Amino acid sequence: MFKLAFCAGHYLHTPGKRIPKQLDPKETREWMLNDRIADHLQKAAAERGMETLRTDDPTGEAFVDIPERTAAANAWGADLYVDIHHNGALGIFDGSGVEIFSYPGSAQGRKYRDAIYEAVVAAGGLKGNRANPLQEVRFASLSMTKMPAVLVEYGYMDSIADVPVILTDDYARKVAYATVDAIAQVAGLAPAYPQAEFIRDVQRACGAKVDGIAGPETLSKTVTISEQKNRTHPVVAAVQKYLHSRGYTQVGKADGIAGVKFTAAVIAYQEDHRCWVDGEITAGHKTWKTLLGLL
Ligand SMILES: [Zn+2]
Protein backbone atom coordinates (compact mmCIF):
# COMPACT_ATOMS: atom_id res chain seq x y z
CA MET A 1 0.00 0.00 0.00
CA PHE A 2 1.29 3.46 -0.88
CA LYS A 3 2.38 5.38 2.21
CA LEU A 4 1.88 9.14 2.08
CA ALA A 5 3.37 11.27 4.87
CA PHE A 6 2.47 14.92 5.01
CA CYS A 7 2.22 17.93 7.28
CA ALA A 8 0.70 21.36 7.49
CA GLY A 9 3.72 23.67 7.60
CA HIS A 10 4.44 25.56 10.86
CA TYR A 11 1.86 25.57 13.66
CA LEU A 12 -1.05 27.71 14.74
CA HIS A 13 1.05 30.16 16.74
CA THR A 14 3.98 30.70 14.39
CA PRO A 15 4.65 34.43 14.54
CA GLY A 16 4.22 36.42 11.37
CA LYS A 17 2.92 33.76 9.02
CA ARG A 18 -0.55 35.08 8.20
CA ILE A 19 -2.54 37.03 5.61
CA PRO A 20 -2.00 40.80 5.99
CA LYS A 21 -4.92 42.71 7.51
CA GLN A 22 -5.39 44.81 4.38
CA LEU A 23 -6.32 41.68 2.43
CA ASP A 24 -8.09 39.73 5.18
CA PRO A 25 -9.48 41.49 8.26
CA LYS A 26 -9.26 38.17 10.12
CA GLU A 27 -5.55 37.85 9.35
CA THR A 28 -5.96 34.13 8.73
CA ARG A 29 -2.85 32.26 9.77
CA GLU A 30 -0.83 30.19 7.36
CA TRP A 31 -1.17 27.04 9.45
CA MET A 32 -4.97 27.25 9.18
CA LEU A 33 -4.79 27.35 5.40
CA ASN A 34 -2.23 24.54 5.40
CA ASP A 35 -4.32 22.51 7.85
CA ARG A 36 -7.43 22.72 5.70
CA ILE A 37 -5.57 21.35 2.70
CA ALA A 38 -3.98 18.69 4.94
CA ASP A 39 -7.44 17.50 6.05
CA HIS A 40 -8.72 17.22 2.49
CA LEU A 41 -5.48 15.56 1.42
CA GLN A 42 -5.82 12.92 4.11
CA LYS A 43 -9.38 12.19 3.05
CA ALA A 44 -8.54 12.05 -0.64
CA ALA A 45 -5.56 9.77 -0.01
CA ALA A 46 -7.62 7.41 2.15
CA GLU A 47 -10.33 7.27 -0.52
CA ARG A 48 -7.70 6.18 -3.01
CA GLY A 49 -6.47 3.43 -0.74
CA MET A 50 -3.28 5.15 0.46
CA GLU A 51 -2.01 4.89 3.99
CA THR A 52 -1.40 8.29 5.54
CA LEU A 53 0.71 9.75 8.31
CA ARG A 54 0.36 13.34 9.41
CA THR A 55 3.50 14.57 11.13
CA ASP A 56 2.44 17.91 12.61
CA ASP A 57 -0.05 18.36 15.44
CA PRO A 58 -3.50 18.35 13.77
CA THR A 59 -4.82 20.71 16.47
CA GLY A 60 -2.04 23.20 15.65
CA GLU A 61 -1.43 23.84 19.34
CA ALA A 62 1.82 21.94 19.80
CA PHE A 63 4.91 22.87 17.84
CA VAL A 64 6.53 19.87 16.15
CA ASP A 65 9.86 20.82 14.62
CA ILE A 66 11.04 19.68 11.21
CA PRO A 67 13.57 17.07 12.44
CA GLU A 68 10.80 15.44 14.46
CA ARG A 69 8.36 15.49 11.55
CA THR A 70 10.82 14.05 9.07
CA ALA A 71 12.07 11.44 11.56
CA ALA A 72 8.50 10.18 11.95
CA ALA A 73 8.11 9.87 8.18
CA ASN A 74 11.48 8.12 7.89
CA ALA A 75 10.69 5.65 10.67
CA TRP A 76 7.31 4.90 9.12
CA GLY A 77 8.88 4.22 5.72
CA ALA A 78 6.83 6.73 3.74
CA ASP A 79 6.86 6.56 -0.06
CA LEU A 80 6.44 10.32 -0.40
CA TYR A 81 6.49 13.35 1.88
CA VAL A 82 4.35 16.41 1.16
CA ASP A 83 5.02 19.59 3.12
CA ILE A 84 2.03 21.93 2.75
CA HIS A 85 2.53 25.71 2.79
CA HIS A 86 1.29 29.07 1.59
CA ASN A 87 3.75 31.66 0.41
CA GLY A 88 4.52 35.24 1.31
CA ALA A 89 6.46 37.74 -0.73
CA LEU A 90 6.75 40.12 2.24
CA GLY A 91 4.69 42.92 0.79
CA ILE A 92 1.28 43.20 -0.78
CA PHE A 93 1.62 42.59 -4.48
CA ASP A 94 -0.39 41.41 -7.44
CA GLY A 95 1.75 38.47 -8.46
CA SER A 96 0.45 35.05 -7.68
CA GLY A 97 0.63 31.37 -8.09
CA VAL A 98 1.61 27.96 -6.89
CA GLU A 99 5.27 27.05 -6.38
CA ILE A 100 6.67 23.62 -5.68
CA PHE A 101 10.11 22.55 -4.53
CA SER A 102 11.96 19.25 -4.62
CA TYR A 103 15.39 18.24 -3.37
CA PRO A 104 18.33 18.86 -5.74
CA GLY A 105 19.09 15.78 -7.79
CA SER A 106 16.03 13.79 -6.74
CA ALA A 107 14.60 12.58 -10.05
CA GLN A 108 11.60 11.00 -8.38
CA GLY A 109 10.99 14.14 -6.33
CA ARG A 110 11.05 16.16 -9.52
CA LYS A 111 8.52 13.83 -11.12
CA TYR A 112 6.07 14.25 -8.24
CA ARG A 113 6.74 17.99 -8.16
CA ASP A 114 5.98 18.52 -11.85
CA ALA A 115 2.87 16.31 -11.86
CA ILE A 116 1.47 17.95 -8.72
CA TYR A 117 2.09 21.40 -10.16
CA GLU A 118 0.23 20.63 -13.35
CA ALA A 119 -2.71 19.05 -11.51
CA VAL A 120 -2.96 21.78 -8.86
CA VAL A 121 -2.84 24.62 -11.37
CA ALA A 122 -5.47 22.89 -13.52
CA ALA A 123 -7.76 22.30 -10.53
CA GLY A 124 -7.22 25.53 -8.62
CA GLY A 125 -6.51 28.00 -11.38
CA LEU A 126 -3.62 29.80 -9.65
CA LYS A 127 -1.11 29.47 -12.46
CA GLY A 128 0.43 32.74 -11.49
CA ASN A 129 3.20 34.72 -13.04
CA ARG A 130 6.25 33.45 -11.21
CA ALA A 131 9.25 33.11 -13.48
CA ASN A 132 10.25 29.77 -12.00
CA PRO A 133 7.48 27.99 -10.10
CA LEU A 134 9.32 24.66 -10.03
CA GLN A 135 12.65 24.59 -8.28
CA GLU A 136 15.13 22.40 -6.48
CA VAL A 137 15.98 23.77 -3.05
CA ARG A 138 17.65 22.34 0.05
CA PHE A 139 14.76 23.09 2.39
CA ALA A 140 15.06 21.23 5.71
CA SER A 141 11.99 19.04 5.16
CA LEU A 142 13.32 18.02 1.74
CA SER A 143 16.84 17.24 2.89
CA MET A 144 15.96 15.45 6.13
CA THR A 145 13.49 13.04 4.55
CA LYS A 146 14.83 9.79 3.13
CA MET A 147 12.04 9.39 0.56
CA PRO A 148 11.06 11.66 -2.35
CA ALA A 149 9.64 14.86 -0.91
CA VAL A 150 7.97 18.01 -2.16
CA LEU A 151 7.21 21.32 -0.52
CA VAL A 152 4.10 22.86 -2.04
CA GLU A 153 3.28 26.55 -1.72
CA TYR A 154 -0.42 26.58 -2.63
CA GLY A 155 -0.58 30.34 -3.27
CA TYR A 156 0.50 33.70 -1.88
CA MET A 157 -0.91 35.08 1.36
CA ASP A 158 0.04 38.61 0.36
CA SER A 159 -1.18 38.47 -3.22
CA ILE A 160 -4.25 40.46 -4.18
CA ALA A 161 -5.07 37.79 -6.74
CA ASP A 162 -4.54 34.71 -4.57
CA VAL A 163 -6.04 35.66 -1.22
CA PRO A 164 -9.74 35.53 -2.19
CA VAL A 165 -9.09 32.10 -3.71
CA ILE A 166 -6.92 30.50 -1.02
CA LEU A 167 -9.38 31.57 1.67
CA THR A 168 -12.10 29.32 0.24
CA ASP A 169 -12.62 25.75 1.33
CA ASP A 170 -13.52 24.97 -2.26
CA TYR A 171 -9.96 25.77 -3.35
CA ALA A 172 -8.46 23.69 -0.53
CA ARG A 173 -10.57 20.69 -1.48
CA LYS A 174 -9.87 20.92 -5.17
CA VAL A 175 -6.11 21.30 -4.86
CA ALA A 176 -5.88 18.54 -2.25
CA TYR A 177 -7.71 16.07 -4.49
CA ALA A 178 -5.61 17.20 -7.46
CA THR A 179 -2.44 16.64 -5.45
CA VAL A 180 -3.49 13.11 -4.55
CA ASP A 181 -4.52 12.39 -8.16
CA ALA A 182 -1.11 13.48 -9.37
CA ILE A 183 0.64 11.38 -6.73
CA ALA A 184 -1.43 8.33 -7.68
CA GLN A 185 -0.58 8.88 -11.31
CA VAL A 186 3.18 9.14 -10.74
CA ALA A 187 3.11 6.20 -8.32
CA GLY A 188 1.26 4.14 -10.92
CA LEU A 189 -1.76 3.58 -8.69
CA ALA A 190 -5.05 2.95 -10.40
CA PRO A 191 -7.47 5.87 -10.01
CA ALA A 192 -10.35 5.26 -7.61
CA TYR A 193 -12.88 5.21 -10.43
CA PRO A 194 -11.22 5.20 -13.84
CA GLN A 195 -12.90 7.19 -16.60
CA ALA A 196 -13.37 4.06 -18.76
CA GLU A 197 -15.15 2.25 -15.92
CA PHE A 198 -17.44 5.24 -15.42
CA ILE A 199 -18.19 5.31 -19.15
CA ARG A 200 -19.02 1.60 -19.09
CA ASP A 201 -21.38 2.14 -16.14
CA VAL A 202 -23.09 5.02 -17.96
CA GLN A 203 -23.41 2.95 -21.15
CA ARG A 204 -24.89 0.03 -19.21
CA ALA A 205 -27.35 2.25 -17.32
CA CYS A 206 -28.47 4.10 -20.45
CA GLY A 207 -28.67 1.10 -22.78
CA ALA A 208 -25.81 2.14 -25.04
CA LYS A 209 -23.17 -0.21 -26.45
CA VAL A 210 -20.87 -1.09 -23.54
CA ASP A 211 -17.23 -0.63 -24.58
CA GLY A 212 -15.84 2.00 -22.20
CA ILE A 213 -15.28 4.43 -25.05
CA ALA A 214 -17.63 7.39 -25.25
CA GLY A 215 -18.75 8.64 -28.67
CA PRO A 216 -21.84 10.03 -30.40
CA GLU A 217 -23.82 6.83 -29.74
CA THR A 218 -23.19 6.95 -25.99
CA LEU A 219 -24.02 10.65 -25.89
CA SER A 220 -27.29 10.11 -27.80
CA LYS A 221 -28.42 7.58 -25.17
CA THR A 222 -27.74 9.84 -22.16
CA VAL A 223 -30.74 10.93 -20.14
CA THR A 224 -31.49 14.14 -18.26
CA ILE A 225 -30.94 13.70 -14.54
CA SER A 226 -31.63 16.15 -11.72
CA GLU A 227 -33.68 16.41 -8.56
CA GLN A 228 -36.72 16.96 -10.79
CA LYS A 229 -36.01 14.62 -13.69
CA ASN A 230 -35.18 10.90 -13.57
CA ARG A 231 -33.91 11.31 -10.04
CA THR A 232 -33.69 7.55 -9.45
CA HIS A 233 -32.49 6.56 -12.92
CA PRO A 234 -29.79 3.84 -12.72
CA VAL A 235 -27.20 6.26 -14.16
CA VAL A 236 -27.50 8.54 -11.11
CA ALA A 237 -25.36 6.23 -8.96
CA ALA A 238 -22.55 6.19 -11.53
CA VAL A 239 -22.54 9.98 -11.74
CA GLN A 240 -22.55 10.27 -7.95
CA LYS A 241 -19.60 7.90 -7.69
CA TYR A 242 -17.75 9.71 -10.46
CA LEU A 243 -18.26 13.18 -8.98
CA HIS A 244 -17.11 11.96 -5.58
CA SER A 245 -13.98 10.37 -7.06
CA ARG A 246 -13.10 13.65 -8.76
CA GLY A 247 -13.26 15.66 -5.53
CA TYR A 248 -16.92 16.72 -5.54
CA THR A 249 -17.38 15.08 -2.17
CA GLN A 250 -20.42 17.19 -1.35
CA VAL A 251 -22.34 14.66 -3.47
CA GLY A 252 -22.29 12.26 -0.49
CA LYS A 253 -22.91 8.52 -0.77
CA ALA A 254 -23.71 6.96 -4.14
CA ASP A 255 -27.27 5.99 -3.18
CA GLY A 256 -28.73 6.31 -6.67
CA ILE A 257 -31.08 9.14 -5.75
CA ALA A 258 -30.50 12.68 -7.01
CA GLY A 259 -31.24 14.98 -4.05
CA VAL A 260 -29.96 18.30 -2.75
CA LYS A 261 -26.39 16.98 -2.35
CA PHE A 262 -26.42 15.80 -5.93
CA THR A 263 -27.55 19.23 -7.11
CA ALA A 264 -24.83 20.96 -5.08
CA ALA A 265 -22.12 18.73 -6.53
CA VAL A 266 -23.42 19.14 -10.09
CA ILE A 267 -23.49 22.93 -9.69
CA ALA A 268 -19.89 22.93 -8.45
CA TYR A 269 -18.86 20.68 -11.33
CA GLN A 270 -20.65 22.86 -13.88
CA GLU A 271 -19.00 25.99 -12.49
CA ASP A 272 -15.55 24.41 -12.69
CA HIS A 273 -16.08 23.17 -16.22
CA ARG A 274 -17.75 26.28 -17.63
CA CYS A 275 -21.04 24.54 -18.28
CA TRP A 276 -24.48 26.10 -18.02
CA VAL A 277 -24.94 26.15 -14.23
CA ASP A 278 -28.38 24.79 -13.33
CA GLY A 279 -27.76 21.64 -11.29
CA GLU A 280 -29.23 19.48 -14.03
CA ILE A 281 -27.33 17.12 -16.34
CA THR A 282 -29.24 17.50 -19.57
CA ALA A 283 -29.29 14.66 -22.13
CA GLY A 284 -26.69 15.18 -24.85
CA HIS A 285 -25.60 18.56 -23.53
CA LYS A 286 -22.30 20.02 -22.35
CA THR A 287 -22.22 18.63 -18.80
CA TRP A 288 -22.69 15.10 -20.12
CA LYS A 289 -20.06 15.70 -22.80
CA THR A 290 -17.61 16.93 -20.18
CA LEU A 291 -18.33 14.03 -17.82
CA LEU A 292 -17.78 11.56 -20.64
CA GLY A 293 -14.52 13.24 -21.67
CA LEU A 294 -15.88 14.30 -25.05
CA LEU A 295 -14.75 17.92 -24.72
ZN1 LIG B 1 5.13 28.24 5.18
Image (cartoon, rainbow, N blue to C red):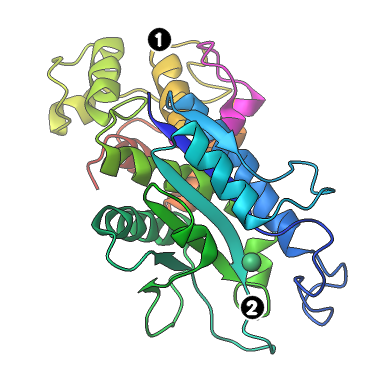
Please state, as top left, top right, bottom left or bottom right, where the N terminus lies in the image: top left
Helix, strand, or loop for circle 2?
loop
Kind of residue at disc 1 = Pro
Q: Nearer the viewer, residue 1 or 141?
A: 141
252 in magenta? yes
Q: Is ligand 1 closer than 8 angstroms to the Cβ of mark 1? A: no
Quadrant assignment, res 213: top left
Would residue 280 be seen by someone viewing this image from the given angle? no
Q: Are marks 2 and 1 in contact (CB under 8 Å)?
A: no
For marks 2 and 1, give the CA distance. 49 Å
Principal SS element in the magenta part?
A: loop
In front: label 2 or label 1: 2
Q: Percent from the top left, x then y, of residue 140?
A: 53, 64
Q: Is ligand 1 closer than 8 angstroms to the Cβ of mark 2? A: yes
The residue lying at 60 percent from left, 54 percent from top is: 67
Kind of residue at disc 2 = Gly
First-in-chain label (2 vs 1): 2
Residue 234 is tagged as 1
Q: Nearer the viewer, residue 192 or 133?
A: 133
The residue lying at 69 percent from left, 90 percent from top is: 91
Q: Residues within 10 Å of mark 1 (few under 14, many from 20)?
A: some
Residue 120 shown left or right of residue 67 in the figure: left
Would residue 188 be seen by someone viewing this image from the given angle? yes
Relative to 33, residue 50 above or below: above
Relative to 81, residue 100 above or below: below
Q: Which residues are magenta?
A: 246-261
Disc 2: which residue: 88
Q: Residues within 10 Å of mark 2 (few under 14, many from 20)?
A: many
Quadrant assignment, res 163: bottom right
Residue 216 shown left or right of residue 262 in the figure: left
Q: Percent from the top left, x then y, of residue 71?
A: 56, 45
Q: Nearer the viewer, residue 63 or 264?
A: 63
